Image (cartoon, rainbow, N blue to C red):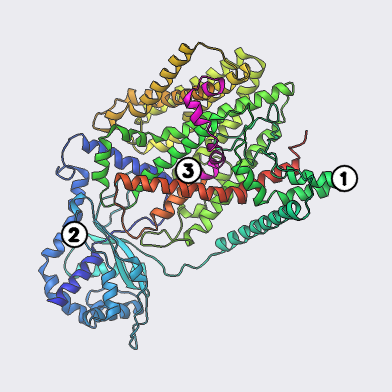
């Protein structure tokens, strides 16, 4: 009886298993997460227990997965024949499959050693996943013990077998010839289990063995598919070697620049040595004190990018060495651009000029925090969890959860701030220079400001990140589809939101592509606004109405719901992301609202006089509109079905309205009508965090992927746990963003200033 139970347990644990995608795709994650929440919302409308309706998608599929176990238990031949089969020397031949000779011998040796109760063999059996309570609530992910499996070594060996190590594998049981779930659709929930097998067996060997064993007992209703094994030793490839060499070069310059900086400050110092002033010398600034960045709302204001990271030390060199050649001065500035000491001090500095738009810092950081919050939940939805559907049903019933569902508008805050800063800074520069702007530097600075750090993080993601972790679910081919072989160039050209956007590389960079495209078009509006308020306003309104018309038509014709989680009649769930969410012609509304706000601040010189009662009314309108956007569609996430016209109207105007609300907050806080809101948003503590927002945006999904997919057990979702995950993700993202900024972002800006001498007039 012991042998029967032992082998039966082993067979069940091998057979009742499900694989997972070898590679993670950001676009698929968002689509799948939205689709899951949409179906949960639809089910929630019935106000019934989730797994009770025979017609329900998930309940029927869960039952189908449960039938796998049921059929195995019902097949008495397993009890009668499996022990004898397992100890037969010709077990592989008996099940009628062809596998590699070494795998055949080692598998037979493993089974025989299990029956002989060898300790290492029992560890392999113990490492298999085992069913737990809560199957009907979705707890069908039995990962087993990854660490125990990979630590196994078959110490005793025969002439033909033994000496192997344990290797962790997983697979999925599904109907024969079942195709993988399409992006944006719900895969069939089936039990998932980990397997511990000899490392001499390949993925194909294991799949053949299990399917042959199932056929041996006439089990034909399902088969093992998608077996994936975790290699114990992942060798470095040429891409990883090249990436390490590039990072080593950067590290070398960081060490040299920092040592040189410290040498000048503390060894070759004198009483008259100039201390860093952290005063921005932005070429596009109106007074050389304004800490604004004309590039993007995610980019820092009075940050490393606009401060001369080498001014203090390099100026000291120039002043004390008047006969030094210009080339030597430039070389010194290039070296000092890599100083971690100076760059770190500038990032952490909290001093701001009086005429800066201080509230922008708070809005930027809080918006970035909201992005991380939304992604914390979205990424958890596609990771293995033991209680996904019950937890989401409970969450959907809470009005407060709408802030998670509608976290997508947090990105529209960045578009608004980007348009506002571009308009205010560039118009001020044009006024100062009688309408002249160096348009080459306008575009070059933008590209140089974004691209180097962007490409470096992308390089680390594609070439190195797969080597830093392991675990039962770790994607050993990396987090990007096909290692970005076919799509990396679209990222470099900032067209990844338009070209091949259904399988983007570095998927969350769709925002950068949109913002770059808006930036390229912005002079068409800015020049006319500078020349004529009337004609500039006409062009601005023309752009806005064109965006509204396009968005409305796309939403109506493509049957796009008002959100990825909302119910709408005839909604096309696959079109939301590619045809609407990524499309610049559907997303420019808040950017235009930001340009209008920046123009208002420019023509009024940040001095607007209105009655307090008027300001209060505008505050109420803005707050009410923002709350309506976030919480107004609650019913459509809980069973009510929106019409196509409602979906089209909401998609057309809600992002622009959100941009107008954010614009009012900036205008009110800048002109003295912000009250306690301005006090909060202008807090100095937000300034360093605001400077790191761009790098935090680049790295935060990688931080979450690394955490979620290195877990050894499925997540159990609950409110306190999700809050803990959120703060952990945010702190880790900003900590890594600080390192990335020091290593790549700040030095590139210092190089630009040294080469183009942007700090000089």
How far is the residue under mark 1 from the one under mark 2? Answer: 83 Å
x and y, in percent, of residue 14 in the image: 25, 67
Where does the magenta region start and end?
Answer: 668-696
Query: Which numbered disc, 1 or 2, marks the residue closer to the eye?
Result: 1
Chief secondary structure of the magenta span?
A: helix
Q: Nearer the viewer, residue 250 or 90?
A: 250
Label 2 vs label 3, nearer the camera: 3
Find the distance from the CA under tag 2 to the CA under tag 3. 38 Å
Q: Which is more toward the observer, 150 or 339?
A: 339
Disc 1 to disc 3, how far (Cα)?
49 Å
x, y (%) of residue 174?
A: 25, 57
Q: Is residue 309 magenta?
A: no
Q: Is residue 92 left or right of residue 382?
A: left
Residue 91, picture quadrant:
bottom left
Q: Which residue is mark 1?
A: 322
State the SS at label 1: loop
Q: Is residue 19 above or below residue 680?
A: below
Residue annotated with mark 3: 508
Residue 558, located in which quarter of the rendered image? top left
Residue 669 in the magenta stretch? The answer is yes
Front tag of 1 and 3: 1
In the rendered image, the quadrant that contains the N terminus is bottom left
Look at the picture and state if 544 lies above or below 565.
above
Q: Which mark is residue 562?
A: none
Label 3 crowd bin: few (<14), some (14–19), many (20+), radius 10 Å? some
Seen in the picture, residue 365 relative to 127 is either above or below; the reply is above
Q: Is residue 748 left or right of residue 508?
A: right
Task: Please say if the residues under marks 2 and 3 sit with CB atoms less than 8 Å apart.
Answer: no
Q: Earlier in the sequence, mark 1 or mark 3?
A: 1
Q: Nearer the viewer, residue 275 or 308?
A: 275
Which residue does the numbered mark 2 point to in the structure image? Answer: 68
């Amino acid at each position: 009886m012991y042998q029967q139970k032992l082998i039966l347990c082993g067979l069940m644990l091998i057979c009742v298993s499900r694989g997972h995608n070898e590679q993670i795709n950001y676009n698929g994650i968002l689509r799948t997460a939205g689709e899951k929440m949409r179906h949960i919302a639809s089910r929630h409308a019935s106000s019934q227990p989730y797994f009770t309706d025979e017609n329900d998608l998930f309940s029927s599929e869960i039952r189908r997965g449960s039938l796998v176990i049921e059929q195995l238990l019902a097949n008495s031949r397993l009890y009668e024949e499996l022990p004898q089969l397992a100890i037969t020397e010709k077990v592989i031949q008996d099940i009628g499959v062809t596998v590699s000779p070494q795998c055949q011998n080692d598998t037979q040796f493993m089974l025989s050693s299990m029956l002989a109760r060898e300790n290492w063999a029992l560890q392999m059996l113990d490492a298999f996943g085992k069913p737990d309570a809560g199957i009907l609530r979705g707890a069908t992910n039995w990962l087993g013990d990854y660490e125990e499996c990979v630590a196994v070594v078959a110490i005793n060996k025969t002439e033909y077998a033994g000496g192997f190590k344990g290797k962790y594998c997983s697979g999925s049981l599904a109907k024969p010839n079942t195709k993988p779930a399409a992006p944006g659709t719900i895969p069939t929930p089936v039990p998932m289990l980990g397997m511990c097998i000899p490392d001499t067996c390949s993925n194909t060997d294991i799949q053949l063995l299990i399917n042959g064993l199932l056929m041996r007992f006439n089990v034909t209703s399902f088969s093992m598919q998608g077996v994936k094994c975790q290699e114990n030793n992942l060798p470095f490839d040429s891409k990883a070697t090249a990436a390490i060499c590039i990072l080593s070069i950067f590290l070398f310059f960081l060490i040299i620049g920092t040592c040189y900086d410290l040498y000048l400050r503390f060894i070759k110092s004198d009483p008259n040595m100039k201390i860093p002033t952290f005063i921005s010398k932005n070429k596009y600034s109106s007074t050389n004190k304004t800490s604004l960045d004309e590039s993007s709302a995610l980019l820092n204001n009075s940050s490393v990018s606009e401060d001369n990271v080498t001014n203090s030390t390099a100026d000291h060199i120039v002043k004390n060495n008047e006969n030094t050649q210009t080339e030597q001065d430039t070389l010194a500035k290039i070296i000092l651009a890599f100083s971690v000491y100076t760059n770190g001090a500038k990032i952490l500095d909290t001093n701001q000029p009086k005429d800066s738009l201080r509230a922008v810092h708070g809005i930027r950081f809080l918006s970035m925090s909201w992005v991380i919050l939304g992604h914390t939940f979205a990424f958890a939805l596609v990771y293995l969890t033991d209680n996904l559907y019950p937890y989401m049903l409970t969450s959907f019933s809470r009005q407060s959860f709408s802030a998670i569902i509608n976290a997508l508008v947090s990105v529209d805050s960045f578009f608004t701030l980007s348009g506002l800063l571009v308009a205010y800074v560039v118009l001020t520069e044009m006024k100062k220079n009688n309408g002249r702007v160096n348009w080459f530097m306008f575009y070059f600075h933008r590209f140089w400001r974004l691209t180097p750090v962007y490409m470096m993080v992308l390089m680390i993601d594609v070439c190195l990140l797969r080597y830093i972790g392991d675990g039962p679910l770790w994607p050993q081919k990396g987090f990007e589809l096909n290692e970005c072989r076919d799509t990396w160039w679209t990222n470099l050209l900032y067209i990844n939101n338009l070209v091949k956007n259904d399988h983007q590389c570095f998927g969350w960079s769709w925002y950068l592509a949109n913002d770059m495209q808006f930036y390229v078009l912005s002079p068409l509006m800015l020049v006319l606004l500078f020349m004529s308020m009337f004609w500039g306003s006409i062009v601005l309104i023309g752009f806005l109405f064109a965006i509204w018309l396009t968005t409305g038509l796309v939403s109506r014709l493509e049957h796009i719901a008002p959100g990825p989680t909302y119910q709408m009649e005839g909604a096309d769930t696959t079109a939301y992301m590619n045809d609407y969410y990524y499309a610049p012609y559907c997303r420019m509304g808040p950017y235009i609202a930001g340009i209008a706000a920046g123009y208002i601040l420019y023509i009024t010189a940040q001095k607007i006089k209105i009655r307090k009662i008027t300001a209060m009314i505008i505050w109420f309108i803005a707050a009410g509109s923002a709350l309506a956007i976030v919480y107004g569609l609650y019913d459509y996430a809980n069973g009510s079905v929106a019409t196509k016209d409602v979906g089209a109207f909401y998609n057309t105007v809600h992002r622009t309205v959100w941009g107008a609300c954010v614009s009012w907050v900036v205008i009110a806080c800048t002109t003295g009508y912000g009250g306690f809101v301005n006090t909060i948003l202008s807090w100095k503590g937000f300034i360093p965090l605001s400077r790191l927002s761009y790098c935090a945006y680049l790295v935060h999904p990688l931080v979450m992927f690394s955490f979620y997919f290195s877990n050894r057990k499925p997540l159990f979702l609950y409110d306190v746990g999700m809050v803990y995950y959120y703060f952990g993700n945010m702190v880790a993202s900003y900590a890594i963003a600080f390192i990335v900024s020091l290593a790549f972002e700040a030095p590139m800006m210092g190089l630009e200033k040294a080469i183009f001498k942007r700090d000089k007039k």
